Every structure is written in structure tokens, then in C-alpha cells.
Amino acid sequence: MGSASKVIPGYRFTQGVTFFYISLILLLPLAAFVLFATGMGWEKFIGKAFEYRILHGYLVSFACALAAAIINGIFGLILAWVLVRYEFPGKRIMDGLIDLPFALPTAVAGIALTTLYVETGWLGQFFYAIGLPSAFSVLGITIALIFVGIPFVTRSVQPVLKDLEPEIEEAAALLGAGKWLTFRKVIFPELTAPLLTGFALAFARGIGEYGSVVFIAGNTPFETEIAPLLIMTELEQFDYQAAAAIAIVMMAISFLILLSINGYQRYRIREQGV
Amino acid sequence: MATSIMQNRMFSSDSRAKPELAPVSAETLVKWLLIFLSAAFLVVMLILPLILVGAEALSKGWEAYVAALAEPFAQKALLLTVEATVIAVLLNTVFGVASAWLLTKFDFRGKAVLGSLIDLPFAISPVVAGLFFIMLFGRMSPFYPTLQAYHAAVVFAVPGIILATVFVTFPFITRELVPVMEAQGRSEEEAAATMGAGGWTIFRYVTLPNIKWGLIYGIILCTARAMGEFGAVSVVSGHIRGKTNTLPLHIEILYNEYNFTAAFAVASILVFIAILILVLRNMVEWRTQNRRIQRQRPH
Amino acid sequence: MKMKKVFSLALGVLFAAGVMAGCGTEEKAATENGSAKEFLNVSYDPTRELYAEFNKEFTKVWKERSGKDMTFSQSNGGSGKQARSVIEGLEADVVTLALAYDVDEIAQAGLIKGEWLKKFPDNSAPYTSTIVFLVRKGNPKNIKDWDDLVRDDVAIITPNPKTSGGARWNYLAAWEFARRKYSGDEAEIKAFIKKLFKNVVVLDSGARGATTSFVQRGQGDVLIAWENEALITLKDSSDYEIVAPSISILAEPSVAVVDEVVDRKGTREVAEAYINYLYEPAGQEIAAKNFYRPRNKEVLEKYKYQFPELSLFTIDEAFGGWSKAQKEHFVDGGTFDQIYQK
């Protein structure tokens, strides 16, 4: 496999572990699933997976996940920056809070968020006052997806920012570059990779999220019906294959998104490396 | 104690934030603006929901709260959650380090595909992830008769719950480590290897100190997610009280039997565990920083 | 090199140990014929308290009758999801689900043999319920019957019949009302149902979610709910009242013995005794105490005060059974989907 010139040891070992684990945990179950789904034949697969109502479901899921990932990207970057670079009272608490969305079961998060964002809720009243229905709407779905995705960007950027050599910045500062220029030209490029990683993860997570969204979505067909809910709907009718068809399309699209982001990063690293 | 932590921290990071040559006033303005933005975001998106959970949990008083937690089914669910989480995190740590090493220290064809494959569990709806294991080990699976013959239940039993948890959380550590290791580059490892150090030695003494923070973040994210996982586990669990109910499933059951308060009380336990882990992390962080300062002092 | 091998081996062992950790405990449960000690009733959500009480009682009864100790466990979840779990391999000795359709699916997968509906009295439904309206105190929108639900000023909460088995009863009850009102004119019935669902503000995925939307979040003017769940809500709060429509459907939650499992485990005897006990006065009493309508006349008389009076029809009378109703209304492209078709 052209690994002869490797200086650093461990190629075979890490490759072995990685492939063994991925095969066992991911590929084998995935294969079982796809095999089962393809039993239905192409016609049914296409007919089901691209039904108009289902297409709308994909649209809602992807659009809301994208919006949530962008918002998380912006705030995640700010949060990481604030937590690494500044000292202020309450910083440790702030740092500690970031991971909590993961520990809270998604259903609990969904219920709590819905209570907050309905018309009579603590926060919902402000949204409704300016004419934005923040629950049982696409906005509500986006809010839930922001919540479940908070940790991704911050936690990806934070370690890299922490390990960034201060010398480069100092040099830039000494050379007379302003803070903003230094950030844009020196620091930000270093952070693109983790930022993209975090963004991609938050995005992907949002597409598949179900537990927290169903409570706040309203679930009205053609309006606030997300694709994972449609999978559940098919399952509820004992139609495993139709459910699998929708799931496979979603997986394929998500995989392509992740692949292009990872591919872009490879490309960037190669450009820089030369 | 707390103040000494703060002081030590400030002391150590001061040395890093020293060379500030730009005008101070604008600098401080930006600083506080950003801190304000972060705080506002967290309050709206995170702290308020958490407060709500706490308020609901205590809405019927402490007694109801304690009673919800003292229930034997709740405690069994807690034990199962801890068991599944510990096993999943151990396995995923080994895998995470190995795969991150593979992805960052070597070039090979199909690297982007491998990286994306590792991310895939994030993109798969947890419910579907649960179905994967049902198709592989459930009654529709060709392996089912064999499993039956050996009385080995995988799905609707504890092993299935562990597998589902592992599946949902396995990208975390890799994903945390890859950017850090990428930023570090390979030169240090290459130098060590040229000097004849073995793989384990290089990892232990060259790489590990550099990726420590990424690794810790990864483990914490993985732990938090493993504890809170609901969708996938719900599909493979079978919901048998006292046997295959994890804490999140127990919460769902309480909620479905119109026991709002108890559901939130149990949910607050998960939040507490998460906070406990974070406190532990902070202590580790503080200790290492302390040691570094002590090491620096004689100079 | 040695290090690596040891390490790989350790990883393998750790993994296997992790996966096997639970197998050990499960093995004890699966034993030879007749000596199984574990019994599982797979049920749907709102029966949790009912069966917690029933299992406790039946543990004693079974010990008296057979001299054997047995642990009776239960599993609760959405009715359809629970049926799926059984099909997928969850070892249920008996199932007690929200609708016959879900049990039919289990039978179709080969786990239940023969005509299960006839195996126990009263269509294998030892207790029943019906569909009523839950409104806010004082009934401010003056909702009396199904007609009022299509008024423009009424906001309705009901779960989605496609994801919630229980909600299918709601849908069918409304449909039958419209059928009688418009004496069977299909177009008029569909227009009525369409109007009704246009008034639905939140289409929750399950019955519990719908109750939360109505009670905790103050959404909607009326919740279309199962009688037993409406009664539970009333027990906790006096801010609501129940309105009984002129007619409603007799909801018959089905029970069945899962043949494939009991034959393998050798638990047929106890499974049948378990279900039969549901029909005995003691079992009926437990059902009534948990707000289900008992079949037993004397027990019903005793608990009559808690159930509103209304005229009930069965699904067999009105729709010719579940599989027919399912095919017409709830499959993809059925009458429910047509409401939202563009």
C-alpha cells in the first residue's frame, strides 16, 4: 500500500485496529441494513425515497440543520476564543457548561425547550411578540438543533487554539500588525480545519436528530415534518423497507457532505504543506 | 481553594497573553463584547433549559425529588447507564487514538473516505442506528437461530445497549484528536523515530503530552453523549423495567406515565453526573498547570 | 512488536467482554422447558400502572395456584413500537397492546398462531376505553360534540394517527360521526375530517406528547384523548373537564399469548393463566381502578360513577375490523394522507 517510506511506526497496527473496529461496529451492521432494504427492489425504493412529501421532509431537515450549524459555527468560534484567550469571573463555569447538551437525553432537552419557546414560555413571549412563532415551526426545529449541536464547534476549536504557538502572534504584533489583521491572517487560517470539522459534525448531527425535535416541531406534513419523523412513521406501519429507503437516502447525502468537507481539508493541507 | 485555582490559572495564562501592544481600550471593548455575546448565547440556549429542568424536578418539593431517585428501578437504570458508558468510552478511546494516529501520521489513498466513514455515525439518525443492530442480531437476522441456540441474547439485552452506545459515540475522540494532531504536524514524531524510538515510546512521550487536551475533551464529550443517548438505545433495549432500562429510557417511561416531576428529577441526575465529570477535568487541568508552574519556577 | 500483539489481543478481549457482559445475566433467564423463572408482558404506554399493580397481585396468585415462584416483568412503549420489538426478537410471553392491528402484525410475522382474536372472551380485550374530549375548566369554547371541532374558532390537539396507534381510534371515531351525519357521503365525510385536522395546531407523535402540549403548554382548546388518560389528567388537576361526545368508538386494547415464545420457554400455562386472570373479578377491579372500563358487569356497576355515559360503537360494526380500517385510512396514500395532499 505504499507504506514503505513511512518513518513513524505504527501504521500497520493503527490501521489494523481502525479497520477492525469500523468493520465490526459500523460496516457490518450497515451492510445488514442495506441488504435488508434492497430486498424491496429498485422501483419501490425510488418511489418511496423520493415521494413528494418525503422530499419536503429532507428539505426541512437539511435546511434547519444547516442554519443551526452556521449559528453554532459563529457562536462556537466566539466561545472558544473567549474561553481560551480571556480571563473573567465565571469562566470555568461557562467552560463546564458547554458539554451538557450531550448529557441531557434529547427528549428532556426537547421538552424543556418547548416549554421555554411556546407562546407563553419565558422566551417564547418575546419571539411571538415580534411575530416569530418560536415553537411548532421551522424556527423551533432550528432552536432544538442549535441546542444539541452546541458542543461540537467549541470543543473542536478550543484545543487547537490552546496549542497555537503564541510566538507567531507575538511576531505578527511586533511587526506592527493590528489585532484584527493578526487574527484574520495568522490565527484564523489555523482554525479553519477544526472549525469546519465542528461545523460538519453539528450539521450531520442535526440532520439525523429526532428525539429533541419532535416535541418542538409541530409535525405538520409539508410544513414542519422532519425526515427522521417520516422514518418513524413508516416503521409505525411496519414498513421496514420504506423506512430503510428514506434512511439510506439521508445517510448517502450526509456522507457526501462529510466526504466533501474532509476532502476539502485534505486538499488544503496539501496546499499548505507544499 | 477556588480562589487559588483562579489565581494559578491567571498566573499561568498571563505569561501567554502578555505581549499586547495594540491600544488597550478597543481591546477591552472587544473582549467584553465577545464575553457578553458568549454569555448571552449560553444563557438563552443552554442555561435556561437547564434551569427549567431543575425547576420542574423540584416543583413538588425535595421529598418527591428524593423519592424519584430512591426508586429501585431508577437506581438499576443508573447502574446500567454507568456500565454501558464506561465500556463504550474505554473501547472508543483505544479506537479513537489509533484511528487519529492513522489519519494524521500517514498518507494513504482513501483517507478522506475513511475520515468520513468515522464521522458517519453522527449523520445517522440514532433510531436507524438502532435498527442496524436489530437487522444484524434480531429475529429477522440469519444469525438469530445460532444466537438462540447458545442462549446469547444481543438485542433486547445489555450487549445490544452497549453496542448501540458504542456506535453512537465512536467518532468523538477521533474527531477531537485529528485537528490537534494535524496542527502539531509530524516532525517531532519523525525526529523521535529517526533516533530509534519505538511506536509506544513515541506516543507516550512525544505525542501524548501534546494531544492531552484534545483527548480529554474527546473523552468527556464521548462520556456525556454515551450517558444521554436515547434514540438508538431505545430501539434495541426492549424497555424491560429493572433489566434493560437505561436512565434516559427510564425518564421516558416516567414521562409517559404522566410523572413529569420524577422524569425531570431523574434527568437532573444526568446533569449532575456531567457536572461531576467536568469538575474532575478541571482538577486535572489545574494539577498539570500547577506542576508546570512549579517546574518553571527554579529558572 | 510483542507489545502490539499483546495490545491487540487485550483490545479484542475487552471488546468481547463488553459485549458478553450482559449475556451472562440473560442466560439465566432462558432455561429448559417449564423451569423458566422470568415472564414478560410487553404492553403499551398508559398501562404501566395497571400492570405494575396486576403483576404484583398475580405473582401471589400464581404462587398459590402452582406453587412456583416467577418474576413478572413488563415493558412499556408506543404500541406499534412494542409490537415491532416483539417481531424483532423481544421475548414477550404475552402482549397487551392498544389495538388489534399491532397484534395482527405480530401474528403475521409468525409469532402468534391461529385466530388469536377468538382465543379469549370479548375479542381478546379484557377491558375497554373510549375517546372523549378534554377541555379547559368551564368549557370556554362550549364544545359539546364532534361538530364543534370543525368550527373555525376551535384549536385541537390530537396525536398523529400514523405514528400513534391510540390516535387511530380518535380518527375513526370522528370519521364514523361524520359518516352518520352525512349518511355516508364520502366527499362530505372527507371535507369534515379535513376541516377537523386543519384545526389541529400540534400534531404530536404520541399521546403523551399531545397531553403535554395541551396541559403543560396551554396549546389548543380541546384534546381528543383516551378516556383513561383524560381521567388520569383530571386526577392530578382540576383545571380541566371531560366532555363526552354524542357517540364514540369502543376502544378495545388487545391481549394475546405469543405462541413462539411460550412454546420455546415452556410458559404457555402461566401465560394463559395470566390473561385469564385479567378477566376474573380481581383483575377487572384492577383495570377499573386504573380507569379502564371493565367487561365484568358487577365491577362496572361498582365503578360506573367515574365513566361518562355515551353511545359506543365497535370498530367491527363501523369499519369491518382493523385490517380493513388500516388499509383504507392509515396506509401511505390512505384517507389520512389525503388530508394533507397537495
Image (cartoon, coloured by chain):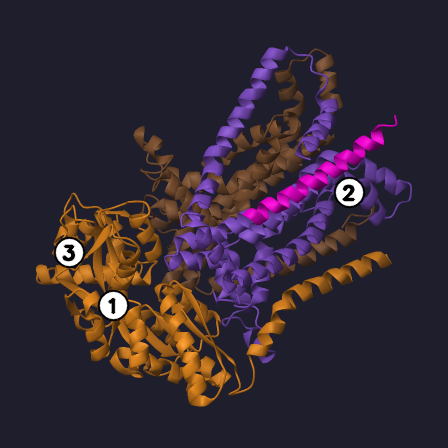
Q: What residue is disc 2 on?
A: B208
- Mark 3, chain letter? C
Is mark 3 in CB contact (under 8 Å) with mark 1?
no
- Colour purple, chain: B
* Quadrant location of the C terminus of chain A in the rendered image: top right
User: Do discs 3 and 1 share a chain?
Assistant: yes
Residue B21 seen in render:
yes
Residue B270 picture location, percent across and down: 54, 50
Between tags 3 and 1, which lies in front? Answer: 1
Q: Tell me the number on the disc at residue A104.
A: none
Residue B281 is covered by the magenta coloring: yes
Could you tell whether C185 is left or right of C60 in the image?
Answer: left
Badge 1 amino acid = Ser
**Residue occupying image coordinates x 49% and y 81%:** C70
- Labels 3 and 1: the sequence-earlier one: 1
Q: What residue is disc 1 on?
A: C129
Q: How many labels does the image show?
A: 3
Of C32 and C60, nearer the camera is: C60
Q: What residue is disc 3 on?
A: C146
* Tint applied to chain C in the drawing: orange
